[in-house]
Amino acid sequence: MAKIIDGKKISAAVRDGVKAEVAKLKEQGIHTCLAVIIVGDDPASKIYVANKEKACEYTGIESRKYALPAETKMEELLALIDKLNNDKTVNGILCQLPLPKGLDEKRVIEAISPQKDVDAFCHENVGKIMTGEFDFLPCTPAGIMEMLEYEGIDPAGKNCVVIGRSNIVGKPMGMLLLHKNGTVTICHSRTRDLPEVTRRADILVSAVGKANFVTADMVGDGAVVIDVGMNRDENGKLCGDVLFSEVEKKASAITPVPGGVGPMTIAVLMKNTLTAARRQNNL
Ligand code: GUN
């Protein structure tokens, strides 16, 4: 049976570290603040934003929420981002995705000042991930790296297979594993004989977004399996990409859903906001 990697426990340790550092900044008269923009009323986005607000409250970071109606015009959204870019009391800006139809996500991402882009989504921050000279790392891949480190799992020399090539998870995940000297393969919908590739993984990361996509025949004995999926099964129950009941019998370690990668993503967001506050105060 696999070891269950406890994202709640590991993320609590990260959040406690941030809380202590935020308190230290406060003693120096520096107040840390994250602005969160949510447009429309997508139920999943509302839950994510509420969880981010909770994490801010816990760590002592001020959270300023801007909830805009779905009919918001691009110009209005860009004007708000411009105002927040120029507001010295705001250290980080996050615009929850996806945006309602008619709003241009790419333009929104590039409008956020790179120094306040705590998601690390803009071109400048993405480019820095390639060279390894980053200030911020995208929250989900960075959270996964923290989990691996906490569990003493070193990617160096290992076969690391990522399923999914999104800009937010798959591509940066591959890059971070490469920075840690993993031998990285990124798979996608056009990959030939996917099970043959994934079976060779020592570390397998699935970021596909399909319930029960990764079955036991796709996993080698003793693999470390990281599940980024947040899906609903046929009964409407929250589940990941990995068929947990089967795969846990083969893996050496596995993340559950919920309670795995999800809490880590938010903990890294807090870390990035702290980093932004430090940088903006030349610390
Ligand atoms: N929507 C789903 N995940 C994320 C995230 O990490 N950041 C933002 N801004 N939107 C998201």
Image: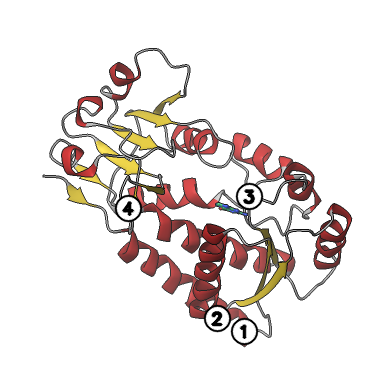
In primary-sequence order, the first of circles 1 and 2 is: 1
**Residue at 80% across, 67% down:** 84
Disc nearest the viewer among 1 and 2: 2
**Residue at 39% across, 52% down:** 261
Q: Is residue 30 above or below residue 171?
A: below
Whole-angstrom CA distance, mark 2 to mark 4, is: 27 Å
Disc 4 C-beta below 8 A from ligand 1:
no
Residue where numbered disc 2 is placed:
60
| Label 2–label 4 contact, CB within 8 A | no
Whole-angstrom CA distance, mark 1 to mark 3, is: 33 Å
Q: Which mark is residue 257?
A: 4
In primary-sequence order, the first of circles 2 and 4 is: 2
Q: Which mark is residue 26?
A: 1
The kind of residue on which mark 3 rests is: Pro
- The residue nearer to you, when weighing 65 against 238, is 238
Residue where numbered disc 3 is placed:
98
The kind of residue on which mark 4 rests is: Val
| Label 1–label 4 contact, CB within 8 A | no
Disc 2 C-beta below 8 A from ligand 1:
no
Across and down, in percent, residue 267 comes to: 47, 63
